[in-house]
Amino acid sequence: MGCGLHLRVTDEDSGKDAKCPECGTIQPVRKSSSRDDQTSAPGDAVTETDNPFRSPSGLESGDVPVQADRPDVRLTPTTVRTGDVLRYSWDIFRRNLGLCVLFSVTMLGVVLGLELIMFGVLGVLTLFDALDPLTADLNTLLMALLMVLVAGFVVLLGVTWIQCGQALFMLRVARGEEARLGDLFSGGPFVLRAFGLILLTGILILMLFLLVAAPFVAVDLGPVGYAVANIVVYLASLYIMLALYFLVDQDQGVVESLRSSLIFMRGNKRAAFLMHLAVGFGCMAFVLVTCFLGSVFVLPFALLVLAVFYVAATGQLPLSSSSLKPSDA
């Protein structure tokens, strides 16, 4: 209208005159177009570009709105098939084999370096008997324990930083985007939230484990209880396995990323279980056959499979028209 206000009318009113409730201006209503239907108010326009990773099913009224880094992407809960995820992952892994192996070696080296820091601190303190309660005085013992806690915290933050970076790197590979080794070190903005996510999920999993195992332990069936608790914990972890990807890919918070994972894993838990089964046994066999030298190949492939599962489950990666369909479970 003359005042800049956008009004939405029915198709039957197209071509008629309309009066603005704000300024009173009367203007003819032009016929709607597919572009206009996407616009409801200034600043609220939803643009649809030629994004190759948008869901093949389109945007339906039941889609879950998730704000992405790329404003043209709207994520849609999509049911995936394990075979399609594995085939696509293997194909793109072969095409990026050199980069993936370099990524694996670099990641293992960084993680090993972080662990050496912790072992170095423990070694120095042990050398001077600072951790020995029989020989060290109270102040020395407390100071040594504080140093261990600080070193452990730093190492955990470093490992979390690398986990965020590997997720970003693998998401680029999964989408067919240009991935660089430097992406492994680009997880800085997400470290604290990711650390909070890991801490929260660890506490929840521990509570669930104790809750399930306690009744068995009470009747002297501890081993059975631990086995049942491990199964329950694994099944529960399937619901939240995508949380880290939502956190780094959609810039979500801790609770929001857990909620998104719960939503997008509906109808995909069976596929995730079969994927874990196939990748777990297959990778283990390959590592054993190659006398553990195959770890540099297994690690990036397993991480890539998880990233492909995420982009497929969120409707960003139409693996095939027959294998992906909107999830209703």
Image (cartoon, rainbow, N blue to C red):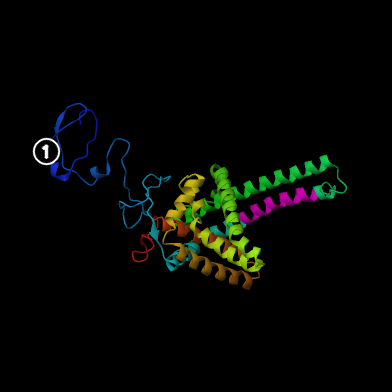
Q: Residue furthest left?
A: 16
Q: Residue furthest front?
A: 219
**Vertically, is 25 above or below 158?**
above
- Which of these two is toward me, 193 or 104? 193
Residue 177 at x, y percent in the picture: 45, 53
Q: Is residue 223 left or right of residue 6?
A: right
Q: Residue furthest right?
A: 135
Is 138 included in the stretch rendered in magenta?
A: no
Residue 184 visible in rendering: no
Is 112 included in the stretch rendered in magenta?
A: yes
If the image is split into quadrants, where does the N terminus sit?
top left
- Crowding near the residue tagged with mark 1, few <14, some 14–19, many ≥20 C-alpha atoms within 10 Å: few
Q: Is residue 21 left or right of residue 217?
A: left
Residue at mark 1: 16
The three-letter code of the residue at mark 1 reads Lys
* Residue at 27%, 39% in the rendered image: 40
* Residue at 52%, 62% in the rendered image: 235
* Residue at 45%, 66% in the rendered image: 82
If the image is split into quadrants, where does the C terminus sit?
bottom left
Residue 90 at x, y percent in the picture: 48, 65
- Which of these two is toward me, 25 or 132? 132
Q: Is residue 260 left or right of residue 5?
A: right
Which quadrant would residue 219 be assigned to in this image?
A: bottom right
Residue 271 at x, y percent in the picture: 45, 65
Q: Which residues, given as a range, are shown in magenta? A: 107-124
Residue 53 at x, y percent in the picture: 38, 54
Q: Secondary structure of the magenta portion, mostly? A: helix
Say what secondary structure mark 1 lies in.
loop
